[in-house]
C-alpha cells in the first residue's frame, strides 16, 4: 500500500496536474474549463483529475448536471512538512558556510584580491 505522501508527490509530479491545481486555487471549475488551456482530449484531462482526486487534492461536487471541481489543499500540508525538514537543513548549512567564509575573511583583512 502506498503512503499518502507518495501518492501526493506522484500526483504533483506532472506539470499538467500542477496547472490544474493552480487554476483551482482561483475557485471551482468544470472539467471543460480545466481542459481549455491544454491541447488534449477531455478523456486525458479526466484521467489527470482522477489522479488528483485519488490523492485527495481535489473533490468534485454534484449540482444537477454540473460537477464542479474544487481544490482540497490539505494533503499538501504533509508535503510542506516533509520539505520543511530539508529547508532547515539547507538554512543551517548555508549559515555554517557563511560563518566559515567570515572566519576566512578575518584571516585575510584585505580580502582576496586574486
Image (cartoon, rainbow, N blue to C red):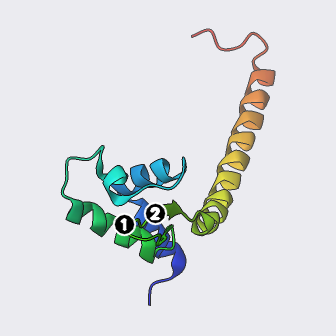
Alpha carbons under labels 2 and 1: distance apart: 9 Å
The circle drawn on residue 58 is: none
In the orientation shown, which residue stands out farthest toward the front?
64
> What residue is rendered at 48% in x and 49% in y?
22
Query: Residue extending furthest bottom?
Result: 1
The image position of residue 4, as x and y in percent, is 53, 78
7 or 114, nearer to the observer: 7
- Disc number at residue 69? 2
Depth check, mark 2 against mark 1: the one in front is: 2
Q: Is residue 32 left or right of residue 19?
A: left
Residue depicted at x 81% and y 23%: 106
Number of residues whose C-alpha sits closer than 10 Å to that of mark 2, classed few (under 14), some (14–19) or many (20 or more): many
Task: Please say if the residues under marks 2 and 1 sit with CB atoms less than 8 Å apart.
Answer: yes
Above or below, comparing residue 52 to residue 41 in the picture:
below
Q: Residue at x 44, y 72 (%)?
A: 53
Q: Is residue 109 left or right of residue 38?
A: right
Choose top left, top right, bottom left or bottom right for residue 67. Answer: bottom left
Q: Quadrant of the N terminus?
A: bottom left
At numbered mark 1, what does the secondary structure look like: helix, strand or loop? helix
Q: Position of residue 77 (x, y in %)?
A: 64, 64
Q: Which residue is mark 1?
A: 49
Whichever of labels 2 and 1 marks the residue nearer the N terminus, that label is: 1
Q: Residue at x 36, y 52 (%)?
A: 34
Front in this rendered view, residue 81 or 88: 81
Label 2 SS: strand
Which residue is at the front of the view, 64 or 29?
Answer: 64
Quadrant of the rendering where the C terminus is positioned:
top right
Residue 81 place in picture, x, y as percent:
67, 64
* x and y, in percent, of residue 28 in the image: 50, 56
Amino acid at each position: 500500500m502506498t503512503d499518502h505522501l507518495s501518492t501526493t508527490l506522484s500526483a504533483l509530479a506532472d506539470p499538467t496536474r500542477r496547472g490544474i491545481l493552480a487554476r483551482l486555487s482561483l475557485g471551482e471549475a468544470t472539467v471543460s474549463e480545466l481542459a481549455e488551456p491544454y491541447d488534449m482530449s477531455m478523456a486525458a484531462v479526466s484521467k489527470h483529475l482522477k489522479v488528483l482526486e485519488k490523492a485527495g487534492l481535489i473533490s468534485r461536487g454534484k449540482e444537477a448536471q454540473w460537477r464542479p471541481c474544487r481544490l482540497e489543499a490539505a494533503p499538501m500540508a504533509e508535503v510542506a512538512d516533509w520539505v520543511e525538514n530539508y529547508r532547515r537543513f539547507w538554512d543551517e548549512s548555508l549559515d555554517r558556510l557563511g560563518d566559515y567564509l567570515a572566519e576566512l575573511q578575518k584571516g585575510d583583512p584585505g580580502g582576496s584580491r586574486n
